[in-house]
Amino acid sequence: MSEYWVISAPGDKTCQQTWDTLNNATKSGNLSANYKFPIPDLKVGTLDQLVGLSDDLGKLDTFVESVTRKVAQYLGEVLEDQRDKLHENLMANNSDLPTYLTRFQWDMAKYPIKQSLRNIADIISKQVGQIDADLKVKSSAYNALKGNLQNLEKKQTGSLLTRNLADLVKKEHFILDSEYLTTLLVIVPKSLFNDWIANYEKITNMIVPRSTQLIHQDNDYGLYTVTLFKKVVEEFKLHARERKFVVREFSYNEQDLAAGKNEITKLVTDKKKQFGPLVRWLKVNFSECFCAWIHVKALRVFVESVLRYGLPVNFQAVVMVPSRKSMKKLRDVLQQLYAHLDHSAHHHSGAQQESAELAGLGFGQSDYFPYVFYKVNVDMIEKTA
């Protein structure tokens, strides 16, 4: 189950009583599994501050979730053919995501509760903003390396018209260090092999007889050599093209060929070197983002509960794992339990909408419930597949 509901309801005589009432109501029919969602005694501040913060926390929630999913998605891309291991790499504080949520503990070291709510929100915003910026830098560097490697690999395996010829030719295929003669590499379509053999010596004057040799062929083309005088090279290229024979620009230089082979080896090595640290960075920062996201949910539950239920702070927050088949029934049970919280509903129509807006929630009527409610989808793969 990837959909979780985080709700809060005001304490009856005690918060434990609220918890017991909710548990008893949802137990029959196994409507949901419930877990306490402990939120520490945070600094309340003024009503004005809470109303302003409510809106900002909504935006922060969206931002932190989007960065969390971005990190998860990029980890999947980096894992490539090991993508099936993505799920086991997405951990929060060394726990799987459902466990972290259902056994949530506020991180006092990272988010000191002596700070104001606004300051805690700012700490999270800066922390996740930095991760987002670092991700852009790291992903563009790694993607550039991967792109260069893919381009070189294509040149190793593509058609003879485009691929790198260095790994197909040998020194003995060429006339080297001659003042007058040179060897060209010519790509000939398979259907024209016979035409080439019969006519290549007549394409221009000054071609060395019987100097052609088939070095390599793929499904469509053959790679031939031909030796001729340097002074007729341009003329030969022109007339060869008219006959659909393509002269590839190539000069046999052992240092250049070795450098080309070294380049691909270097890129493969660089990619392997960067892979481990990048995966580790993504795993660590996915955990940071996910934990920050659940702390934002806790802040929102706290702020909305104070706005809805008033002071002194007295509410029970709960993580519910709804049974997939019974979501509507569960919603009805919660409505019956907490309908009395919406006092204004008895006085005039549209009051639900008004009370939502008064609380600074910005919800449409269809999303408004008499109790504080947030949905959390911990499936990071579903939306990134």
Image: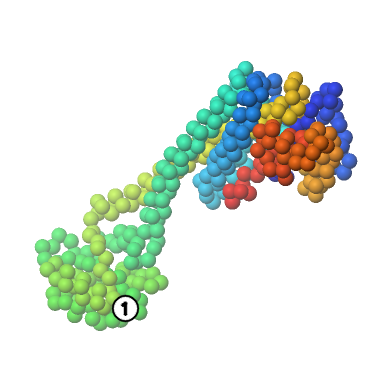
In the rendered image, residue 39, in percent from the top left (x then y), is placed at: 70, 25
Q: Is residue 146 visible?
A: yes
Q: Residue furthest front?
A: 348
Give the image quarter of residue 106: top right
Residue at (38% x, 55% y) in the render: 151
Going by the numbered disc 1, the residue's amino acid type is Phe
Residue 164 lies left or right of residue 231; in this view the side is right
Along the line of sight, the residue nearer the viewer: 141 or 183: 141
In the rendered image, residue 288, in percent from the top left (x then y), is placed at: 57, 32
Residue at (77% x, 48% y) in the render: 324
Residue at (62% x, 42% y) in the render: 88
In the rendered image, residue 237, in percent from the top left (x then y), is placed at: 21, 71
Q: Is residue 35 visible?
A: no
Along the line of sight, the residue nearer the viewer: 98 or 165: 98
Residue at (66% x, 33% y) in the render: 360
Residue 15 lies left or right of residue 208; in this view the side is right
Instruction: Tell me the element at label 1.
Output: helix
Q: Name the colour scheme.
A: rainbow
Q: Is residue 109 above or below residue 56?
A: above
- Counting other residues with Cα less than 10 Å from the Cα at mark 1, is it few (<14), some (14-19), or many (20 or more)? some
Quarter of the rendering occupied by the N terminus: top right
In the rendered image, residue 254, in percent from the top left (x then y), is placed at: 25, 54
Q: Which residue is mark 1?
A: 193
